[in-house]
Image (spheres, grey):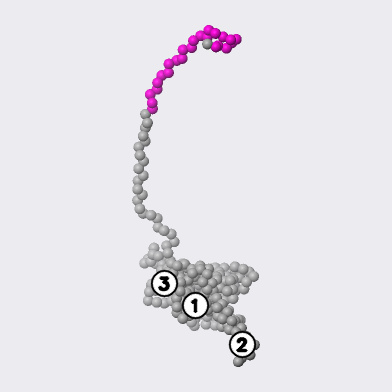
Amino acid sequence: MKPLWIASYALTALVVQSGAAAAPAGTLLFAQPGTQIVGTTGTTRAATKGDHLQSGERLLTPPGAMSQVLLPDGSLIGMRPDSEVRIDLPAAGSDTKPPVVSLVNGTARVISADLLDAKKQPNFTLQSGNATVKLKAADMESAVVKANDRTPAGANAPGSYQRLVVGSGSVSNANTATALKAGQVNFVGAPNTAPVTLATASPNLFATGRVAPPTASNIGTTPKGVGPSSSPPSTTTPKPVVIPPTVRVPSPPVVPIAPAVVKPCTRFIGKTCIQ
């Protein structure tokens, strides 16, 4: 029989390990219908507000839906339509390593914790395709475009794209790091290529990460995963409003009133007539 202190130590270790395993990698602040969470074993469940993502689980947003994830450090990941992200926490005992947020496909908006609260420190690494991104008090858009047979001609080249809105950060790949500057678009195309800054990029690139730039063949079409910006004006001809004719009510005939006959007063009390 094991001594009591050994049994107590084993039970305490089991509780600690169970608590570490259950630590959420992210919390869903909202998830539009159709958003799914894929577990590490491949099981799928519907994602709803308040759900916890565990380490290694993937969040998938379908075309037309978005979601937002709160990371443990207070940073936000806004998932756009037709996108996929995975969050991996460091292994037990590796507290010095930050969690890794992997944008597998599609687009996301990333806001670091210190931009929302100056007292906080961001504690995560964004792995956007082949690009490794570090942010400081930053708001950034990221897109991962994958090559497939459905990619339309003239679409954005496969790879990872970053566009810094505010703040600072860096992108690294192939042992080369490049500083991010607000308004510029950075691109990493392959595992062994250095980051480059693009002169221009598709205006719809960060909508879903799969949108072709405007051409003669796609102008006026709705990109995949993006709904129309506004409802088209109604073309139905309005029904005429029928105003009924005014009904005139004849005025009653004027009856002349005979003038009153005033008789002269014949009896007075003082100056008052009493007849």
| Dot placed on the residue nearer the N-terminal end, 2 or 3 | 2
The answer to which of 130 and 245 lies nearer the viewer is 245
Quarter of the image with the N terminus is bottom right
Residue type indicated by callout 1: Glu
In the image, 73 versus 141, the foreground residue is 73
Look at the image and give the residue range highlighted in magenta: 251-274
Identify the residue shown where x is 35% and y is 37%: 245
Secondary element type, mark 1: loop
For label 2, the crowd category at 10 Å Cα-Cα, with few meaning under 14, some 14 to 19 and many 20 or more, is few
Q: Answer yes or no: is residue 14 visible.
A: yes
Q: Residues within 10 Å of mark 3 (few under 14, many from 20)?
A: some
Nearer mark to the viewer, of 1 and 3:
1
Q: CA distance from mark 2 to mark 1?
A: 33 Å
Q: Position of residue 257 (x, y in %)?
A: 42, 18
- Horizontal relation, residue 236 to residue 57: left or right: left
Earlier residue among tags 1 and 3:
1
Is 195 contained in the magenta span? no
Q: Amino acid at mark 2?
A: Ala
Q: Which residue is mark 1?
A: 57
Badge number at residue 7? 2
**Does the segment drawn in magenta span residue 257?**
yes
- Residue 108: x, y in percent? 50, 71
For label 3, the residue is 155
| Residue drawn 54% across the image and 74% down it | 26
Dot 1 crowding, Cα within 10 Å, few <14, some 14–19, many 20+: many
At horizontal 46% and vertical 76% (from top left) the residue drawn is 38
> Could you tell me what secondary structure mostly forms the magenta stretch?
loop
Q: Is residue 238 above or below residue 42?
A: above
